[in-house]
Image: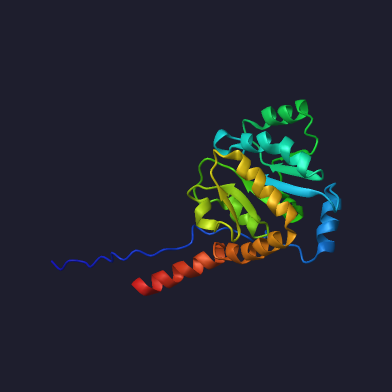
Amino acid sequence: MKKQKHHSNIFKIDGVGVNLSNFYPVKSEDEKLKLRKKYGFSQNDFILIYTAEFIPRKNHKLIFDILPDLKIQIPELKIIFCGKGDLLDYYKNFAKIKEFSYAIFTGYTKDVADYCRISDVLIMPSFQEGLPMGMIEAIATGLPVVASDIRGHRDVIENGINGFLLDVHKILRFKDAIIKLYNEPLLRRQMGQFNIEKAKKYSVDVVIKQMAEIYNKIM
């Protein structure tokens, strides 16, 4: 009986494909300002965003630990938390007790893309990630990133190029990176432009094309 040949080549594709149809940058500063007004923010607000479920491994605690110092150095600071989860009520209550009136909790929302478009910096201090889908969606809107230096984040972020990757146990470095981006709008724009292009390689359309090319090679 003739043995069948099996192909043993290994092919790499960029993840499973992220649907980026709703995640795109604003066309102008005027459009961004109109969106900000729609959601109750001003032109001068410096907006951080974290799009993540409220669970322990997402490490929201790091953000709340640095918020008081950030607010002192960035008076116009706002931070948007998009997501639900077991710890949501805890952190909403914590923010109320600490009088973090500049922390906005959206819970589950279909407006994540708009919230990303009106923001200035994505912060993601999670302890563990696979391919960070939320990060890829957010950078597609043109956001620079301050994130934990972990597997998954390293696949998307080149430290110093399109964001900062930091030791999750050295929380003051997160504060310093955010302040650096606050003080350097040109750097924010450069990282954001890089990320718009970076995100495209993870889009579902690109991944489907990569898979089609692989199938053509082995058929």
User: Which is nearer the eye, 109 or 77?
Assistant: 77
The residue shown at (82%, 45%) is 76
Q: Which corner quadrant of the image does residue 136 belong to?
A: bottom right
**169 with respect to 71 (left or right):** left
**135 with respect to 213 (left or right):** right
- Residue 181 place in picture, x, y as percent: 70, 54
- Residue 79 place in picture, x, y as percent: 74, 43
Outermost residue toward the left in this view: 1
- Residue 152 place in picture, x, y as percent: 50, 51
From this viewpoint, is residue 24 visible? Answer: no
User: Which is nearer the eye, 91 or 112?
Assistant: 91
**159 with respect to 103 (left or right):** left
User: Which is nearer the eye, 5 or 165?
Assistant: 165
Q: Which corner quadrant of the image does residue 64 belong to?
A: top right
From this viewpoint, is residue 62 visible? Answer: yes
Is the C terminus in the top left, top right, bottom left or bottom right quadrant? bottom left
